[in-house]
Amino acid sequence: MDTVRAKQILDSQNTYDVKLEGSSVWIENVDVENGTATVSVGNNTQTVPVEKLQEG
């Protein structure tokens, strides 16, 4: 995924299936300048490169 798509998903009112290494995650924030996203996985929050996120 790229930062533009991650930001679109974050700003959308729809729900999208986004995965990080096979686990579903919720995008909390996208840092376009640094190419990272803060995601929630269960009770854990982490910042990862958006390239690691996959849609679908």
Image (cartoon, helix red, strand yellow):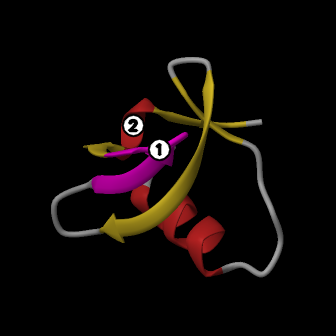
User: Which residue is at a point 35% across and 55% down the rendered structure image?
Assistant: 37
Q: How many marks?
A: 2
Q: Quadrant of residue 9?
A: bottom right
Closer to the camera in the image, 18 or 33: 18
Magenta stretch, overall SS? strand
Q: Is residue 30 left or right of residue 12?
A: left
| Residue 49 point in image, percent of width and height | 29, 41
Helix, strand or loop at disc 1? Answer: loop
Residue 41 colored magenta? Answer: yes
**Residue under pointer 1:** 43
State the extent of the magenta-drawn residues as a range.
Answer: 36-45
Helix, strand or loop at disc 2? Answer: helix
In the displayed structure, would residue 28 be above or below residue 40?
A: below
**Residue under pointer 2:** 51
Q: Residue furthest left?
A: 34
| Residue 6 point in image, percent of width and height | 52, 60
Q: Residue furthest right?
A: 14
